[in-house]
Amino acid sequence: MPKNNNGFEDMADFLGRVSRVDPQKVSLESLEEAANYFMEKLVPNIPRSLRNKEHMADHVKVVVGKEKVKVVFDDIAYYWRFVENGRRDRKAQHFVKGTYEQHKEQIEKIMTKKILESLEG
């Protein structure tokens, strides 16, 4: 008996694979991988203070929550904004924005790669 190639069988097979994927687990894993990649690229671009104190680069980390993943500056969270955006007496350095813009495509690829792999089977 000839096979009916109207596309419904292919779509049913695809939807069957989609239903077996745990989107929460896959998306958190891919977000964490992308955040680690971004942090790896960000740390060398973080300006270091000329003072003999702790530096922002020593306090950056990835935090994984129940539904989101964040790259944060640990104890000095308030300070990085002054360096990034500047103040009236300090020129903005845009190290976070610049790093993200440089590596945006790779970060997006990392975030979608696991999801697409799990959908393909």
Image: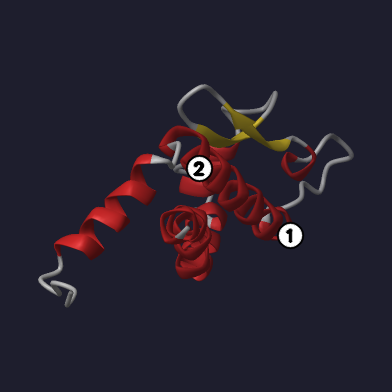
Q: Amino acid at mark 2?
A: Val
Q: Amino acid at mark 1?
A: Pro
Q: Which residue appears farthest toward the right when viewing the image?
A: 52
Quarter holding the N terminus is bottom left
Q: Nearer the viewer, residue 93 or 7?
A: 7
Q: Is residue 81 left or right of residue 19?
A: right
Q: Which residue is mark 2?
A: 26
Q: Dot 1: few (<14), some (14–19), or many (≥20) neighbours within 10 Å?
A: few
Q: Which residue is mark 1?
A: 44
x 57%, y 52%: residue: 34
Q: Which residue appears farthest toward the left when viewing the image?
A: 6
x 45%, y 26%: residue: 67
Vertical side of 64 occupied by 55: above or below: below
Vertical side of 66 occupied by 115: above or below: below
Q: Is residue 81 left or right of residue 2?
A: right
Quadrant of the rendered structure where residue 59 is?
Answer: top right
Element assignment for label 1: helix
Vertical side of 49 occupied by 117: above or below: below
Q: CA distance from mark 2 to mark 1?
A: 29 Å
Residue 71: mark? none
Q: Dot 2: few (<14), some (14–19), or many (≥20) neighbours within 10 Å?
A: some
Look at discs 2 and 1 and give the one toward the viewer.
2
Q: What x and y, as percent, mark residue 10? A: 24, 64
x 59%, y 43%: residue: 32
Q: What x and y, as percent, mark residue 8? A: 15, 61
Q: Could one spot residue 57 in this view of the protein?
A: yes
Q: What x and y, as percent, mark residue 3? A: 18, 74
Q: How is the structure coloured here?
A: secondary structure
x 43%, y 61%: residue: 120
Q: Could one spot residue 83 in this view of the protein?
A: no
Q: What x and y, as percent, mark residue 110? A: 53, 60
Q: Nearer the viewer, residue 120 or 85?
A: 120
